[in-house]
Image: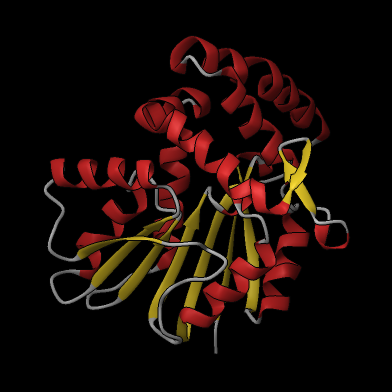
Amino acid sequence: MTPDPTNKGTTHFGFREVPEQAKSGLVAEVFRSVASKYDLMNDLMSFGAHRLWKQFASAQAGVRAGERVLDLAGGSGDMTAKFAPRVGAHGQVVLADINDAMLEVGRARLADAGIAGNVEFVRADAENLPFPADYFDCVCIAFGLRNVTHQDRALASMFRVLKPGGRAIVLEFSRPVLAPLGKVYDIYSFSVLPWLGKTVAHDEASYRYLAESIRKHPDQETLKRMMETAGFERAHYFNLSGGIVALHKGYKY
């Protein structure tokens, strides 16, 4: 469970305690550093499984023609690439990210794939989304929530911009449900991931942060309760790969 930093003006950045106002800048620096090799590293770190996790999230989103979708913390555009063909010419996907470097990666990748015309790129803070209330049919955040300083505020902001009847999808690393898997996962996270970061991306520190940030993220039940507190109804989750990743889903009525 994430600590409540409000009483002391600090929050976690991985396993470090830092001033609240410093975290967004530190996270931004991590993603500026990894942006150019983000997709390659995702494949290496997950053995390609991130593609299956995102495919499942896309299916659960249930996006239809003509809908307006927010791909929050959309980074390199993986989810937008799945949503844009589904919403069609009369729909819209907004790819939003707080990090300019990741937005540029997403813009270039989608252009190379010929995806244009119904996609908008917006630099946005998940805690204070710059969109009207009741605006999107679906909001999706994939592997981004754990990097937000105040996750409760981000969930409340997501709820605000959803239309009544809309749904939110949160895809994020979580807690393995089997103890033996958890032990193997710990070894992998704190030994193999930093080594991959050092060897492939030449940035061991950023990938050590990514491993640490996963451990500081709320577990499945805690995140479900946080969604309910933000106003989401019928909040539930699916464990993927033994709980290494969880997909949470909730509705606004």
Q: Is residue 78 above or below residue 168?
A: above
Q: Quadrant of residue 221?
A: bottom right
Q: Residue at x 51, y 64 (%)?
A: 169
Q: Quadrant of residue 155?
A: bottom right
209 left or right, relative to 28: right
Q: Nearer the viewer, residue 177 or 72?
A: 72
Q: Is residue 63 above or below residue 55?
A: below
Q: Residue at x 35, y 70 (%)?
A: 69
The image quadrant where one finds the C terminus is bottom right
Q: Is residue 176 above or below residue 64?
A: above
Residue 142's spot in the image, x, y percent?
49, 52
Residue extending furthest toward the right: 7
Residue 251 seen: yes
Q: Residue at x 42, y 66 (%)?
A: 61
Residue 48 seen: no
Count all numbered tags in the image, as a single digit.
0
Residue 202's spot in the image, x, y percent?
48, 14
